[in-house]
Amino acid sequence: MVRRRRAVAVVVLGAVLVALLALAVRLGGEVAAVAPGDGPVPTGSTVAVVAPGETLLEVAERVAPGADPAAVAERIREANRLSSSLVAPGRPLVVPAGR
């Protein structure tokens, strides 16, 4: 009986770990794309860290007040090789200098 409980616990724990890993990849899998520490920040660029609850558009508004936020967000997305506009809190983003 103890063996069976242990086996069930191991299977359940394994399933939970796999689910958490899948969620982490889905939500923050792009973190490895470009982050400080992977290499130097391009000349004329800065790094902005995503605040909790902040969207990419809000990051764009914060780092480039007065500029078109959609255009700035697109440049940030391209500079960081993001496949979408979803960003995780705490993620550092390379912000290209204005053109």
Image (tube, helix red, strand yellow):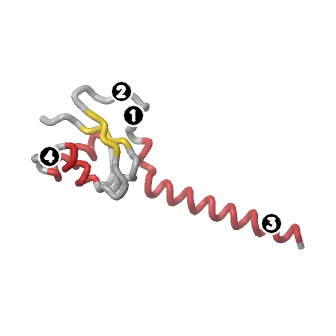
Residue type at tag 3: Ala
Residue type at tag 2: Pro
Answer yes or no: do the residues labelled 3 and 2 have beta carbons within 8 Å?
no
Residue type at tag 4: Pro
How packed is label 3: few (under 14 Cα within 10 Å), some, or many (20 or more)? few
Tag 2 or tag 3, which sits nearer the N-term?
Answer: 3
For residue 33, above or below residue 12: above
- Determine which residue is flagged by label 4: 65
Cα distance in 3D space between marks 3 and 2: 48 Å
**Residue at the image point whose x is 28% and y is 28% from the top:** 42
Cα distance in 3D space between marks 4 and 2: 25 Å
In the image, residue 16 lies at what x, y percent? 63, 64
**Residue at the image point whose x is 39% and y is 28% from the top:** 39
Which one is in front in this view, the residue at disc 4 or the one at disc 2?
A: 4
Tag 4 or tag 3, which sits nearer the N-term?
Answer: 3
Residue type at tag 1: Pro
Residue 68 appears anywhere in the view: yes
How packed is label 2: few (under 14 Cα within 10 Å), some, or many (20 or more)? few
Which numbered tag is attached to residue 7?
3
- Determine which residue is flagged by label 2: 40
**Residue at the image point whose x is 19% and y is 50% from the top:** 61
- Determine which residue is flagged by label 1: 36
